[in-house]
Amino acid sequence: MAVGLTGLPVLHPVPGLQLGTASAGIKKPGRRDIVLIDVPAGAHCAAVFTRNAFCAAPVLVAKRHLAASTPRYLLINTGNANAGTGEQGLRDAIACCEAMAGLAGVGAAEVLPFSTGVIGEPLPVDKITAALPAAFADLNAENWADAAHGIMTTDTVAKGASRRLEINGQTVTITGIAKGAGMIRPDMATMLSFIATDAAVEPGLLQRCLQAAVETSFNAITIDGDTSTNDACMLIATGRSGLPLLVSEQDAAYAAFALAVSEVCATLAQAIVRDGEGATKFMTVEIEGGANAEECRQVAYAIAHSPLVKTAFFASDPNWGRILAAVGRAGVAGLDVGRINIYLNEVCIVQGGGRAPAYQEVLGQAVMKRDEITVRVQLGRGPFAARIWTCDFSYDYVRINAEYRT
């Protein structure tokens, strides 16, 4: 059960962009597993991809096509990752792009492929290409919710976010969807996320905007510490809002636009953690007082990746020794444990490296019974800070991943 997620919000259409879905029967008959996004001519696109050395064939092909042309269509399939498939996987991804290009009357390099699902199995090209006409016929600006459902794999809920803001008298829309529930420590973005806006943004600025937003959102989450082979995040600017082209961070309108993009990314990133496989707790890990930002992230991830910490949270057990041990093994050089304070929400559990004098177990238990908990660590080394989001490990996490291919 996703923590604090009750369903999709209103997802505002983005002028100029259309989405379509279809069922190819890749893994489960009858479910939407093909999503097509029609990118209008003249739009600009930005992208970030996985840093996993075993990146999937669609990632390699998408990078090549982005370098060669401006995208007109994004073709997404679920149920099969087309990863670990060698040269045949590349040929299969290209074949799907060529089929879509022929249907739409565009060049093959104007189609970007995205896949998610089981690793190591051949991509069912015939099933995908057979479903493309239905997805093409389904293209509609209102289909964001259908697309959010169509990109799901082990997700229990569809994930989306949308913002409208006024900039210089013009309404600007930013809408995005994401999928992901396991194999999440992105190191770039998330398993898959697609965000669009009707603002007009110069390509280089759009890329910088996305990278900055990703760094504090999708790059600040972890479920299990595993970086996927297929991670990809796209930001598309259709330019249909009527707002003048944004060309620089110094543009008066840019700050408001960039903030809204960051908010959409943060909402989507948190939704992924809230829907972590088997998750029962949503955990914010905040590190303060670091000598630099990197050591703050080291400590945050040491806590968030600890199976002992995560299982204690599942049990609602305020076992603060596990948190303390994770901080100590984070690899921070010259760490003075005597200066460390640790809080669970507002309750100080560790002060000066030991149990806080005023701490009582009943106070910690009251916090741990909540669905949403903040772990705050003060290192006492400097002015830097970091924040990431994670979840607990439950029995269901093991079951879901043990049964993933059955």
Image (cartoon, rainbow, N blue to C red):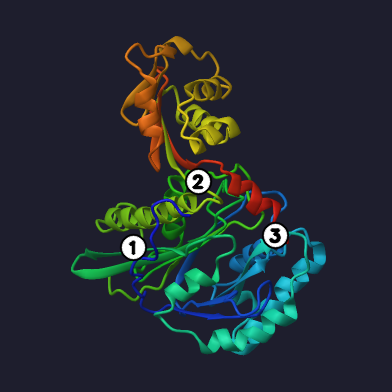
Residue that numbered label 3 is attached to:
56
Q: Count residues near mark 2 (Cα–Cα under 10 Å), then give few for <14, some for 14-19, many for 20+.
A: many
- Residue lying at 50% horizontally and 31% vertically, measured from the top left: 294
Q: Position of residue 395 (x, y in %)?
A: 60, 45
Q: Count residues near mark 1 (Cα–Cα under 10 Å), then give few for <14, some for 14-19, many for 20+.
A: many
Question: What's under tag 2, amino acid-wise?
Answer: Asn
- Residue lying at 35% horizontally and 54% vertically, measured from the top left: 263
Q: Is residue 95 left or right of residue 274?
A: right
Q: Position of residue 321 (x, y in %)?
A: 51, 20
Question: What's under tag 3, amino acid-wise?
Answer: Ala
**Secondary structure beneath label 3:** loop
As displayed, is residue 78 above or below residue 205?
Answer: below
Foreground residue, 78 or 261? 78
Instruction: Give the alpha-carbon distance from disc 1 to disc 2, as whole Å.
Output: 25 Å
Instruction: Give the alpha-carbon distance from disc 2 to disc 3, as whole Å.
Output: 19 Å
As displayed, is residue 105 above or below residue 307?
Answer: below
Residue that numbered label 2 is attached to:
219
Residue that numbered label 1 is attached to:
246
How many numbered marks have been drawn onto this rendered protein structure? 3
Q: Is residue 25 left or right of residue 198?
A: right
N-terminal label among 2 and 3: 3
**Secondary structure beneath label 2:** helix
Given contact means CB atoms under 8 Å apart, are the residues at marks 2 and 3 in contact?
Answer: no
Can residue 234 be seen by looking at this rendering? no
Question: What's under tag 1, amino acid-wise?
Answer: Leu
Q: Position of residue 286 (x, y in %)?
A: 40, 33
